[in-house]
Image: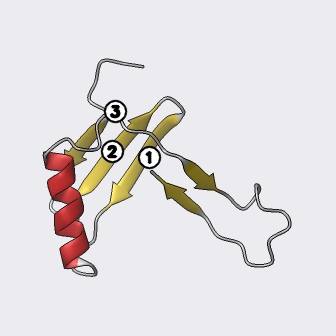
């Protein structure tokens, strides 16, 4: 793991973006305050307070790892 912070917040005039660095690669999250203002504010406060630093994902569902499911989803839960 690198010495850089695992989560970095950026914004370039548009919606805020959060870069989550993991040992398996980076995940870029675009936050949409116009669509979910309360959830966005809460999530960004957690990022600012560094509450997500050094945490782990415990479930990742992709189209490939649910062959027997009739309804397919894609989700990352942490």
**Picture coordinates of residue 59 (x, y %)?**
57, 51
Mark 2 and 3 residues: CB-CB less than 8 Å, in contact?
no
Q: Quadrant of residue 56?
A: top left
Disc ID at residue 19: 2
Q: Earlier in the sequence, mark 2 or mark 3?
A: 2
Residue that carries the numbered disc 3 in the rendered image: 54
Is residue 37 positioned above or below 26 on the image?
below
Is residue 4 toward the left or the right of residue 1 in the image? Answer: left
Tag 2's secondary structure?
strand
Check if mark 2's residue and mark 1's residue have beta carbons within 8 Å: yes
Q: Residue visible at 28% across and 64% down?
A: 31
Left or right: 26, with 4 as reference point: right
Residue 16 image position (x, y, % from top left): 22, 59
Q: CA distance from mark 2 to mark 1?
A: 6 Å
Q: Image height check: is 33 above or below 43?
A: below
Return the residue at label 1: 27
Q: Quadrant of residue 42?
A: bottom left
Name the residue rendered at 77%, 56% in the picture: 64
Classify mark 3: residues with Cα within 10 Å, few (<14), some (14-19) or many (20+).
few
x, y (%) of residue 27? 44, 46
Position of 64 compared to 51: left or right? Answer: right
Query: Which quarter of the figure is the N terminus placed in?
Result: top left
Of labels 2 and 3, the one closer to you:
3
Observer-side mark, 3 or 1, equals 3
Q: CA distance from mark 2 to mark 3?
A: 13 Å
Marks counted in the figure total 3
Q: Secondary structure at mark 1?
A: strand
The quarter holding residue 67 reads bottom right
Mark 2 vs 1, N-terminal side: 2
């Amino acid at each position: 793991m690198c010495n850089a912070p695992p989560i970095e917040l950026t914004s370039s005039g548009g919606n805020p973006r959060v870069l989550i660095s993991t040992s398996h690669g980076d995940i870029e999250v675009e936050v949409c305050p116009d669509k979910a203002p309360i959830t966005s504010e809460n999530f960004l406060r957690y990022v600012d307070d560094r509450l997500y630093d050094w945490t782990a994902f415990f479930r990742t569902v992709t189209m490939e790892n649910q062959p027997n499911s009739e309804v397919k989803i894609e989700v990352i839960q942490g």
